[in-house]
């Protein structure tokens, strides 16, 4: 055994011992209940869940106490004769009415929590959340800040070429950042198919549906990083569109927001600078990076997934007239998974990725696209 | 096809033999056998797909299949189990048992009966061959939610047509059952004297007729959205993706009772026999079944609490769903009271029946938890839901059918099955079932979404356990097949009553039940 193995074994043994005496830490392996909530709604839900669990457990034990007693005591092998009774109005009325009363007892706190959950009024900050195949977009509506958030776990970890990191599949490039102790209202929608935005520790889940804007609120009390996942099947990479939220103190949040605004104006500057003429090699290098946006469907090798996602290699569009190629990438094709990238990518990024597609994977269109050309089509 | 004149009917030995017997048969027992064999083979095939799913989920990372194929497996597994294994399985039981239970010579519409079975192999061949088309089979989940289904390839269209065919088959079968029960009962067999299995099937048949056309409508709208430029579910054309869910679940919730009410019927036959006591609260059982059926039409949106319904809608569907606990509770209490102060023995059918009552109730309680809207926001679309519906569908519907098979096999074949192997099959199934699905409750609570091919490291341990259980559960079913084959081929001779003192007309005919029974109606006491 290598020293590393020994130390993990020791650590495992320790944590096993610790688990048996300490309450199970939230989000750890072997967790048996909902994770420890960090928002008022999350707490209310946990309490409700525990209460209902308890009621169910008691009824279960009583009912099956009777059954197992009967299984033990009323066996034929004890030499007994079967009784002959076949109904009892009194008993039947009792076990219809009592459950009904218990249900009312459950309905009252549930109703209260539900009313509270649905009250999105008087919020301090509104963020629009849009689901895409397979990433999230966050827009801070009153602050002109907007960015995309997608899986940061490298492909090598997924296919087992690298050891898996601590936050395997639950890490993103750009987390959503929110201030603590503020009522945050999220407007949830989607661009293509239905997704669902869910962070378990917030007790917050809402479907992101194209054509709908759903509302959801949360208020996070403890600063920290919280993780969740898309909860509605949304196609091939449904399992690979995590949600990461960083809750910062209001001061830190304000600082972050200010920095972010500057960042986006820098991007604007970069976009204007894109008025310059780009060489083919510059475009190809940039395009290869941007192609990461396309690889989930069209494949890293440009071969796509036959029948579902067309290949770029040898594609009629990618080798045909450049205008058609550009329009398709910018506007997408309604009713298919091919989304419009006009809003997601800047002029130079679109120019680069189209150039790349036209000249990579064995395609030899031989032409390049300049940002100015993209600009003129906007 | 031979004409069904009276003379032909009397000469039993002139029906075609070999394959033609099975293709042309209009005999309810033959057709029952066909349905049951079909159901068993779909059960095994669907189980195989479940094992692909569990193999991929055995460890974090992608090892066995790619995510697109994984989605096809989850979708296909569910479609096969729901439409191929459970529903036809219960129709098989109905074909075999209903005429014998009500003292009828056959089903009322024998030729239609032949058709409703023979549509199925074609439907499922079409469904399964979609896996081999470009783009693969359906991959949007058995719920086929738009707009994701709009994206798929030709496999989705084949699925839609297959569902149309299954729907026709179910509706024909349901009509036949209703007509048989209303017109073919032996004189004196009043409605309130019918065995509970007959009652549950009567109500199920009405549910089928009510909701299968709704499903057909939903998938037809998908088809026209996909190919003919309509935009029922496409917001860009003024359509509404949520409407698909409303229509689907208006079918989908009654569908879950279509899959469980006949199971309740089977349990209500088995428990009295091995308790040597009449069923407790027969009238209440009938009323509870009817109440469940009625409520099943007004609870559908409990599958959609997270779509952003108005508060009043959420409250209505929460309250109506909670109400279902009352008639369901009545059933469980009545089964326990049937056992109470009986003289119990635990042959294999009884073991299955008791396990169903116990395990189904776990599924019932998790169902009640899911009805609590605020809590459902946490459970929805997680493994908690996966655990829940396997507790009601596997340890409810499927295990009830296993119990029913052991219960009536001696009547069907004339041989006793191997009791020892039957018990081993029972224990393996029950233990591995719980090993597979109980940990999934914890996974769901901890935050693992359903329908994902890969997961975060904190979910590893329970997934490993669940996968081990699944393989055990799968292999245990090979033993089931072996016991059935062995029983068909031979075994000690079964008596006419088979069990000590079972109630019901089926036990008054010889074992094996002759090709034609009750050609003259029995006398009902
Ligand atoms: Cu998604
Ligand atoms: Cu339902």
Image (spheres, rainbow, N blue to C red):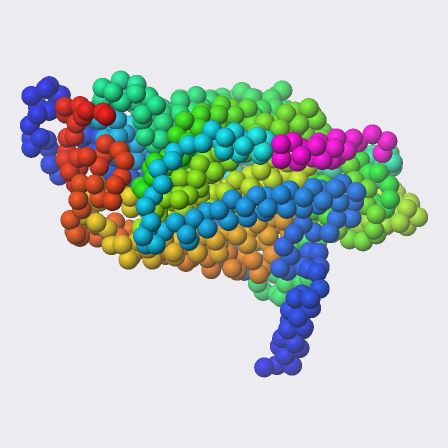
Does the magenta-highlighted stretch encompass residue B43?
A: no
Residue range in magenta is A101-123
Task: Depth check: give the residue in front, B367 or B343.
Answer: B343
Quadrant holding the N terminus of chain B = top left
Residue A48 spot, x, y in % from top left:
69, 41
- Quadrant in the rendering for residue B161: top left
Instruction: Name the residue located 67 percent from the left edge and 49 percent from the top edge.
Output: A34
Instruction: Name the residue located 62 percent from the left edge and 66 percent from the top edge.
Output: A163
Residue A170 spot, x, y in % from top left:
68, 53
Above or below, A154 against B367 in this view is: below
Residue B338 spot, x, y in % from top left:
40, 39
Instruction: Name the residue located 31 percent from the left edge and 25 percent from the top edge.
Output: B193
Task: Depth check: give the residue in front, A288 or A373.
Answer: A288
- Quadrant in the rendering for residue B313: top right
Quadrant holding the C terminus of chain B = top left
Instruction: Name the residue located 53 percent from the left edge and 34 percent from the top edge.
Output: A95
Horizontally, residue A324 falls left or right of residue B185, namely right
């Amino acid at each position: 055994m290598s020293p590393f193995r020994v130390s993990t074994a020791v650590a495992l043994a320790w944590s096993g011992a610790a688990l048996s005496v300490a309450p199970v830490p939230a989000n750890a392996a072997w967790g048996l209940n909902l994770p420890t909530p960090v928002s008022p709604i999350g707490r209310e839900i946990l309490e409700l869940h525990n209460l209902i669990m308890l009621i169910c457990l008691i009824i279960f034990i009583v009912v099956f106490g009777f059954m197992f007693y009967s299984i033990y005591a009323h066996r034929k092998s004890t030499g007994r004769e079967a009784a002959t009774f076949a109904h009892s109005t009194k008993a039947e009325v009792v076990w219809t009415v009592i459950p009904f009363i218990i249900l009312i007892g459950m309905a009252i706190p549930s109703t209260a929590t539900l009313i509270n959950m649905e009250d999105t009024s008087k919020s301090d900050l509104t963020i629009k959340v849009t689901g895409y195949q397979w990433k999230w977009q966050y827009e801070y509506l009153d602050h002109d800040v907007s960015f995309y958030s997608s899986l940061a776990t490298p492909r090598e970890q997924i296919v087992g070429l690298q050891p898996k990191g601590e936050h395997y599949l639950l890490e993103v490039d750009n987390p959503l950042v929110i201030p603590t102790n503020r009522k945050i209202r999220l407007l949830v929608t989607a661009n293509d198919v239905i997704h669902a935005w869910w962070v378990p520790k917030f007790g917050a889940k809402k479907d992101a549906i194209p054509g709908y804007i759903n509302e959801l609120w949360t208020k996070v009390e403890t600063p920290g990083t919280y993780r969740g996942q898309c909860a509605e099947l949304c196609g091939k990479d449904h399992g690979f569109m995590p949600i990461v939220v960083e809750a910062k103190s209001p001061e830190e949040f304000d600082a972050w927001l200010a920095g972010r605004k500057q960042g986006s104006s820098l991007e604007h500057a970069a976009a204007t600078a894109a008025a310059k003429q780009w060489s083919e090699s510059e475009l190809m290098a940039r395009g290869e990076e941007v192609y990461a946006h396309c690889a989930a469907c069209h494949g890293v090798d440009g071969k796509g997934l036959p029948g579902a996602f067309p290949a770029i290699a040898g594609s009629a569009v990618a080798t045909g007239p450049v205008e058609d190629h550009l329009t398709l990438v910018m506007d997408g094709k309604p009713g298919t998974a091919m989304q419009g990238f006009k809003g997601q990518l800047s002029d130079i990024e679109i120019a680069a990725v189209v150039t790349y597609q036209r000249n990579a994977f064995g395609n030899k269109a031989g032409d390049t696209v300049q940002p100015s050309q993209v600009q003129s089509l906007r | 096809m031979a004409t069904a004149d009276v003379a032909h009917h009397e000469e039993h030995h002139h029906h075609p033999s070999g394959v033609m017997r099975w293709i042309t048969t209009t005999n309810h027992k033959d057709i029952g056998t066909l349905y049951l064999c079909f159901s068993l083979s779909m059960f095994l095939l669907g189980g195989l797909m479940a094992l692909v799913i569990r193999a991929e989920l055995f460890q974090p990372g992608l090892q066995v299949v790619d995510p697109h194929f994984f989605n096809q497996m989850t979708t296909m597994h569910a479609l096969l189990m729901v439409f191929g294994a459970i529903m036809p399985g219960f129709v098989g039981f109905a074909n075999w048992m209903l005429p014998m239970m009500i003292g009828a010579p056959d089903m009322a519409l024998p030729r239609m009966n032949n058709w409703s079975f023979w549509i199925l192999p074609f439907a499922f061949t079409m469904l399964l061959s979609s896996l081999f088309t470009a783009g693969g089979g359906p991959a949007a989940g058995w719920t086929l939610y738009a707009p994701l289904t709009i994206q798929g390839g030709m496999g989705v269209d084949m699925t839609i047509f297959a569902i149309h065919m299954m729907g026709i088959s179910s509706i024909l079968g349901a009509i036949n059952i209703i007509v048989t029960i209303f017109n073919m009962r032996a004189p004196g067999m009043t409605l309130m004297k019918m065995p509970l299995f007959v009652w549950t099937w009567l109500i199920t048949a009405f549910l089928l007729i009510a909701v299968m056309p709704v499903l057909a409508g939903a998938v037809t709208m998908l088809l026209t959205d996909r190919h003919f430029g309509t935009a029922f579910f496409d917001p860009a054309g003024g359509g509404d993706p949520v409407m698909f869910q409303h229509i689907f679940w208006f079918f989908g919730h009654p569908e879950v009772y279509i899959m469980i009410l006949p199971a309740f019927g089977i349990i209500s036959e088995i428990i009295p026999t091995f308790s040597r006591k009449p069923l407790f609260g027969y009238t209440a059982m009938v009323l509870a079944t009817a109440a469940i059926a009625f409520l099943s039409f007004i609870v559908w949106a409990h599958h959609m609490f997270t779509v952003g319904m108005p508060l009043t809608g959420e409250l209505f569907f929460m309250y109506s769903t909670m109400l279902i606990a009352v008639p369901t509770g009545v059933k469980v209490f009545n089964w326990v009271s049937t056992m109470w102060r009986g003289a119990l023995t635990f042959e294999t059918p009884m073991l299955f029946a008791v396990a169903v009552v116990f395990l189904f109730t776990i599924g019932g309680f998790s169902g009640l938890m899911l009805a609590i809207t605020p809590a459902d926001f946490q459970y929805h679309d997680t493994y908690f839901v996966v655990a829940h519906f396997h507790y009601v569908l596997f340890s409810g519907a499927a295990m009830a059918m296993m119990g029913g098979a052991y219960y009536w096999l001696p009547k069907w074949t004339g041989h006793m099955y191997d009791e020892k192997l039957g018990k081993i099959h029972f224990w393996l199934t029950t233990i591995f079932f719980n090993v597979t699905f109980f940990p999934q409750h914890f996974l769901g609570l901890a935050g693992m979404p359903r329908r994902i091919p890969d997961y975060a490291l904190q979910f590893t341990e329970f997934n490993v356990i669940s996968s081990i259980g699944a393989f055990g559960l799968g292999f245990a079913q090979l033993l089931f097949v072996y016991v059935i084959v062995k029983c068909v081929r031979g075994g000690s001779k079964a008596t006419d009553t088979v069990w000590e003192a079972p109630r019901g007309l089926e036990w008054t005919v010889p074992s094996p039940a002759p090709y034609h029974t009750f050609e003259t109606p029995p006398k009902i006491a």
